[in-house]
Amino acid sequence: MAVLTSAIAVTEVALYAFTGSIVDRLSSHTPATFLQEEGWKFALMALVVLLVMPALNLLSALVIHQTLLGNFPMRIRWRVHRYLLRQSMGYFHEFAGRIATKLMQTSLAVRETVIKLLDVGNYVVVYFGGALIVAASADWRLMLPFAAWLLAYAVLLRYAIPRLNKVAQEQADARSTMTGRIVDSYTNIATVKLFSHSHREEDYARESMGLFLGTVHRQMRLTTIVNVSNDTLNMLLLFAVAATGITLWMDNAVSVGAIAVAIAFVLRLMGMSQWIMWEMSALFENIGTVQDGINSIALPATVDDAPDAKAITARGPVRGDIRFEHVTFHYGKQGGVIEGLDLHVRPGEKVGLVGRSGAGKSTLINLLLRFYDREGGAIRIDGTDIATVTWDSLRAAIGVVTWTHLAAASFGARQHPLRPPGRQRGRAGRCRAPGQRRRLHP
């Protein structure tokens, strides 16, 4: 992509230079001798215009649109998604909608950053460098207005881009917060309606929209400053190049063709400068989005396999002898959730845990499944410390039916339209007729 972009930029500069030379050749030949002496040059340039440029643009479009734009972000999404699936449970305490938004917008921002650096940035550097060379080849003084414009333009970029970058990072975070809140409202719409929390959800979403809109207003103020400054610089460049060119022509230092090329370059740069400014702003906006995404996504897993971890079935079938040996866990907070717990569950034994909300019943199961690592003590299955086995094989050996699944299965059984109430079955248990005792079979 970068090679093709450079070739396109060089060819365009060569076309501008040739256009200037046409003016000088037309003024130094008669119509009768022009084609005879200059015809081969025009034929060569026609070949470039009709065949070379379309071929370069076709190859560039194929590389960018057919190869990179679709595949590149999808590859990033796939790799990040695989990484996130292996994150610890504590990581997902953040809104799921917010995490998903980070994944989607970061993958697109990485693509845009790479494309703009290697395509747009490369094109601008090669093109402007070629324009300076062409202007200097006529007279070095004709290059001075371009050099001054470039310096002033760089100062403008230096002022605007860091500020746009900062706003972009804040905007990316505000956008993901806003989207996450909206998505989670829809995801949990049954709970919202059940507890009549629609007004709370409205206020919650509106707060995030207000924060996002604040970053948009700051971004637009910066954009207005940049646009006005850029237009002023362009007008000054046009005046300076025209005045310098005419002065040099009056001193017989440059030809009419050189002035034509210089002014053509100015008109081209006037159109490009606005495009360059937006592309550079978008580049650093995407860099800000990538940085924000990396800060949220590229975090090490707090629960991971040991370097020498093996499958829990490596020593044979799992019997299910479970031991909690002086286990301590606090969720990283002061004060104990589980403090020095000893528990032995023998194979085939059924144990019920009863306690108030927050006493640690679910935490005990989460530790057994290694959703979290215990802070002290050890948890063993068949004498093997679960910290020394792969968590994938550990969880594959443990069957879990949560209360949510039991409730959903029971509710689904009662609502089944094809079975009478006394004979309906849920997936995880049996629902008997009203008034009878319900037994749940794991």
Image (cartoon, rainbow, N blue to C red):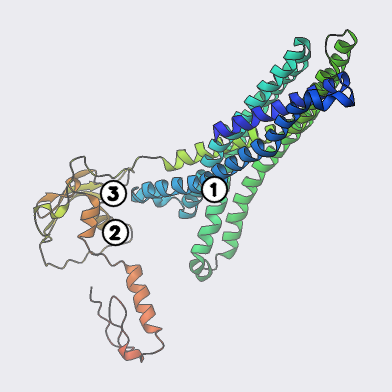
Q: Residue at x 63, y 25 (%)?
A: 126
Residue that numbered label 3 is attached to? 372
The mark closer to the camera, 2 or 3, is 3
Q: Position of residue 76 (x, y in %)?
A: 45, 45
Above or below for 397 versus 176: below
Residue position for label 1: 66
Residue 12 coordinates in the image, percent (x, y): 69, 30
User: Can you say whether 80 is above or below 21 in the image?
Assistant: below
In this rendering, position of residue 240 left or right of residue 410:
right
Task: Evaluate whether residue 257 shows in this view.
Answer: yes
Of the pair 148 and 204, the residue shown nearer to us: 148
| 53 vs 119, nearest the viewer | 53
Which amino acid, by three-letter code, is at mark 1? Gln
Q: Quadrant of the C terminus?
A: bottom left
In the depicted view, which residue is nearer to us: 32 or 78? 32
Verify CB contact (< 8 Å) between mark 1 and mark 2: no
Query: Tag 3, which secondary structure?
Result: loop
Residue behind mark 2: 362
Q: CA distance from mark 2 to mark 3?
A: 12 Å
Amino acid at dot 2: Ser
Q: Is residue 401 above or below residue 229?
A: below
Among the 4 quarters of the image, the one containing residue 138: top right
| Residue appearing at x 30%, y 87% in the figure | 432
Could you tell which of marks 3 and 1 lies nearer the N-terminus?
Answer: 1
- Crowding near the residue tagged with mark 2, few <14, some 14–19, many ≥20 C-alpha atoms within 10 Å: few
Whichever of labels 1 and 2 marks the residue nearer the N terminus, that label is 1
Q: Residue 413: where, in percent of width, then height? A: 36, 82
Secondary structure category for the residue under label 1: helix
Q: Amino acid at mark 3?
A: Tyr
